[in-house]
Image (cartoon, rainbow, N blue to C red):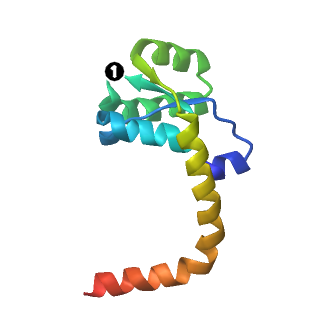
């Protein structure tokens, strides 16, 4: 999200697809970390393929078809909202992580190389 935000993209909401969408705990953690409300999809396992089709249609300029496809195929069953207390805690830890990472990146790569060699 940092990379998208650096390009000026603003997020208001999201949905989660794939295996992680099966776990309410995992979805709530993601929602809290990102601080975004999340629409629960009725068929999260289908969302990746549908998302690609929607992106292709948008790139081809077929915005009406894209909206029609989205309305027809993307169905939600609920809404998760961020727990502000958790979001604030994650934000604090992320700011600390961002300060630490440049100093630790070489050490972490060294650890990963050693671990994979053994």
Q: Residue furthest front?
A: 85
**Rendered view: 55 above or below 30:** above
Determine the secondary structure under disc 1: loop
Q: Position of residue 64 (x, y in %)?
A: 58, 15
Residue holding disc 1: 42
Q: Position of residue 72 (x, y in %)?
A: 42, 12
Q: Position of residue 84 (x, y in %)?
A: 58, 35
**Rendered view: 27 above or below 7:** above
Q: Quadrant of residue 98?
A: bottom right
Q: Nearer the viewer, residue 12 or 98?
A: 98
Q: Is residue 80 left or right of residue 96?
A: left
Q: Position of residue 49 (x, y in %)?
A: 38, 34
Identified at 30% across, 32% down, the residue is 45
Identified at 33% across, 41% down, the residue is 20
Q: Nearer the viewer, residue 64 or 48?
A: 48
Q: How many marks?
A: 1
Identified at 33% across, 21% down, the residue is 42
Q: Quadrant of the C terminus?
A: bottom left
**Rendered view: 79 above or below 52:** above
**Rendered view: 90 above or below 36:** below
Q: In this view of the protein, can residue 35 be seen by the observer? A: no
Q: Residues within 10 Å of mark 1 (few under 14, many from 20)?
A: some
Q: Residue furthest left?
A: 118
Q: Is residue 77 left or right of residue 57?
A: left
């Amino acid at each position: 999200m940092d990379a998208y935000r650096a390009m000026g993209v603003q997020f208001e909401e999201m949905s989660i697809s794939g295996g992680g969408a099966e776990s309410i705990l995992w979805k709530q953690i993601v929602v809290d970390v990102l601080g975004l409300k999340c629409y629960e999809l009725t068929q999260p396992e289908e969302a990746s393929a549908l998302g690609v089709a929607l992106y292709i249609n948008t790139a081809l300029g077929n915005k009406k078809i894209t909206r029609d496809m989205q309305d027809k195929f993307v169905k939600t069953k609920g809404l998760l909202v961020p727990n502000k207390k958790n979001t604030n805690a994650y934000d604090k830890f992320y700011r600390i992580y961002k300060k630490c990472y440049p100093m630790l990146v070489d050490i972490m790569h060294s650890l990963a190389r050693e671990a994979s060699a053994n």
